[in-house]
Amino acid sequence: MARFFIFGANYPQGGTVILSGEDAEHARVLRLRVGEEIVISDGAGRDFNCTVRGFTGAGVEAEVNGIARNTAEPSVAVTVVAGLPKQAERAEYTVQKCTECGATKLLFYRSHRCVADPGQRSIEKKLARWQRIAEEAAKQSGRGMVPEVAYSSDFGAALEAGRKTALPLFLYETGERAPLREVLEAEAPGAGSAAILTGPEGGFEPYEAELARRLGFRVCAMGPRILRCETAPVAALAALMYATGNLS
Amino acid sequence: MARFFIFGANYPQGGTVILSGEDAEHARVLRLRVGEEIVISDGAGRDFNCTVRGFTGAGVEAEVNGIARNTAEPSVAVTVVAGLPKQAERAEYTVQKCTECGATKLLFYRSHRCVADPGQRSIEKKLARWQRIAEEAAKQSGRGMVPEVAYSSDFGAALEAGRKTALPLFLYETGERAPLREVLEAEAPGAGSAAILTGPEGGFEPYEAELARRLGFRVCAMGPRILRCETAPVAALAALMYATGNLS
């Protein structure tokens, strides 16, 4: 069923909703017909189940049949903190897949081995594009919210974003590490929040891992296979969702 | 460390290896230097640890220092059986990510709701490209083998490929399903082989799911979030690797 987000929306049952602007355009692309059922999410976990009533100059008119809590949101709020990839498509892929897999927030950061170094104007464009990709993926996967996508040129800010969660995970491909499974089996059940911190193409400097460890991150291994920078967050997120009972 | 595959290779310790053709080209791209260490895999789980000795007209000359069993192969041989996506990049993505995550074989198939319908010549080109992508991903992730990528225009063949494994999983987004986690916790530990069968963009016909069920597939749910056809195999594979202790 077609989904739309109208952030902060609050419609009464029987009330009328107007999809305008990009939403109306999207409705045209989807070839919505009168009588068709759609869902409008308020972006805060509430779904308005609607029926398309007509098309006016103002946009698509829909009537609210019922209001329900969205059931697709996971029990754990996961912040994915990923080293900014050099290739744009890798970052976009990370946003799309992590949104589908249930991430609540994404933060790209720069660290010592990051090759990418976008200027201010470039990053503003990227952020707008990433946010659009997150919204599309949230619609398509039936999410009740759209993950916020952010960027920081500062590795410290990335650590801080993770440190504030109940289960900060640092995925490290070398050095002293605990098996991800051990950590998740012990700590994931019942965790209300978590962070998955992964590196850029070039990986981490040892001091970056040590910093994370001292800040309380669980430094984890994800097996002997080296995952690309855009693959590791998705694999770790799927494992975390599995371990917290959100993949069943 | 740079990795190469020379299938069926069998070099004695102290012996000399010549990387020629595409491997020599790849070595040039990687700017290999004399004295640099490389790994040459025989594609059957055996790694030849080598040192670059020189560059000749024949290619790159390397000396075998030692022979070791590759440690990156998972304990479970997973066949990923995926509905052929409409968009080429989605299929390529599936091949690359599933190879990184440890799949042993990939089979794309056509089913009732498949939109893609490649001709014979087109599929031969695709298979060659998919196999190249699998080899690149296998090198990059440190695999000891290159997953075989195959295609069948017949859904029955897809079911047969899965049915022959110890744990055939059918990922279904509607109807009667068991939670993936329940199935994996009960059956994954110790399983020597498994299959992950996922649908095309349009999903499955109910009779396709019923067919799979009757053939012994475990019809599973992967949570309330609808995953795209190229995301589901990777998420399921990560969960399966986690459940079998291959993600730690």
Image: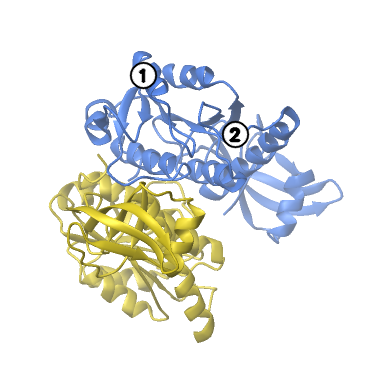
Chain colours: A blue, B yellow
Q: Look at 36% across and 38% down and name the residue there.
A: A241
Mark 2 falls on what kind of element?
A: loop
Q: Look at 17% across and 62% down and name the residue there.
A: B12
- Position above or below: A212 against A25: above
Residue B99 seen in render: no
Q: Label 2: which residue?
A: A43
Residue A175 placed where, x, y %?
29, 29
Residue A161 placed where, x, y %?
49, 20
> Label 2 vs label 1: CA separation?
37 Å
Residue type, numbered disc 1:
Glu
Q: Look at 41% across and 35% down and name the residue there.
A: A74
- Position above or below: A38 against B192: above
Answer yes or no: are tags 2 and 1 on the same subunit: yes
- CB of mark 2 within 8 Å of CB of mark 1? no
Residue A43 placed where, x, y %?
59, 34
Between label 2 and label 1, give the one nearer the viewer.
1
- Chain designation of label 1: A
Q: Label 1: which residue?
A: A210
Q: Residues within 10 Å of mark 2 (few under 14, many from 20)?
A: many
Please state which of residues A60 and B140 is positioned toward the viewer in this rendering: B140
